[in-house]
Image: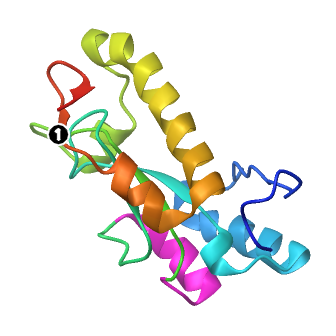
Amino acid sequence: MQLGSKNDPVILLKPSTYMNLSGQSVQKICDFYKIQTQDVLVVTDDIALPFGQLRIKNSGSSGGHNGLLSIQMSLNSTNFPRLRVGVGDRVIGPLEDYVLSRFTEEEFRRFEKVKDRCQEAILLWLKVGVDRAMNQVNKKYDPVVGEEI
């Protein structure tokens, strides 16, 4: 599939598996529709980024994210773009408790803007490809103000 045409089909997949097994769903969709790994955009949370910070990467390691690791293992590749969405890092306690916890009141107020920015980043990736999208999306971000700087 070549991205960029207004007629290109887009498949939105929200795996119903546990996050650690999400690669199974991604692989089945890729196999069935003959989708190349470079045409898959994985949207994932990232504790290494401040809340609301976005980063598009062309490929890379799982960075310890079990969902990404599952996708890499199932596709037998690290060559797929990903949109990393910052959720901030935990202060104390187990990582699982942190990423499964509810947003704080402040995060919840800012979530709508983050969601809109994610949608814009995905549409940009579809229109101009990963390299050009990276240049526009991967800007510095002020997590306190909730805006790019």
Residue 4 position within the rendered picture, expressed as x and y whole percent measured from the top left: 72, 60
Horizontal side of 62 relative to 94 (left or right) equals: right
Q: Residue lying furthest left in this view?
A: 91
Above or below, 104 against 85 in this view is above
Magenta run includes residue 67: yes
Q: Residue lying furthest bottom in this view?
A: 76
Crowding around mark 1 (Cα neighbors within 10 Å: few <14, some 14 to 19, many 20+) is some
Above or below, 86 against 9 in this view is above
Q: How many marks?
A: 1
Amino acid type at mark 1: Arg
Image quarter of the C terminus: top left
**Main SS category, magenta section:** helix
Magenta segment boundaries in residue numbering: 65-78
Above or below, 105 against 22 in this view is above
Horizontal side of 97 relative to 122 (left or right) equals: left
Colouring rule applied to residues:
rainbow
- Badge 1 element: loop
The residue positioned 34% from the left and 41% from the top of the image is 99
Residue under numbered circle 1: 90
Snapshot quadrant of residue 104: top left
Above or below, 89 against 31 in this view is above
Q: Nearer the viewer, residue 6 or 33?
A: 6
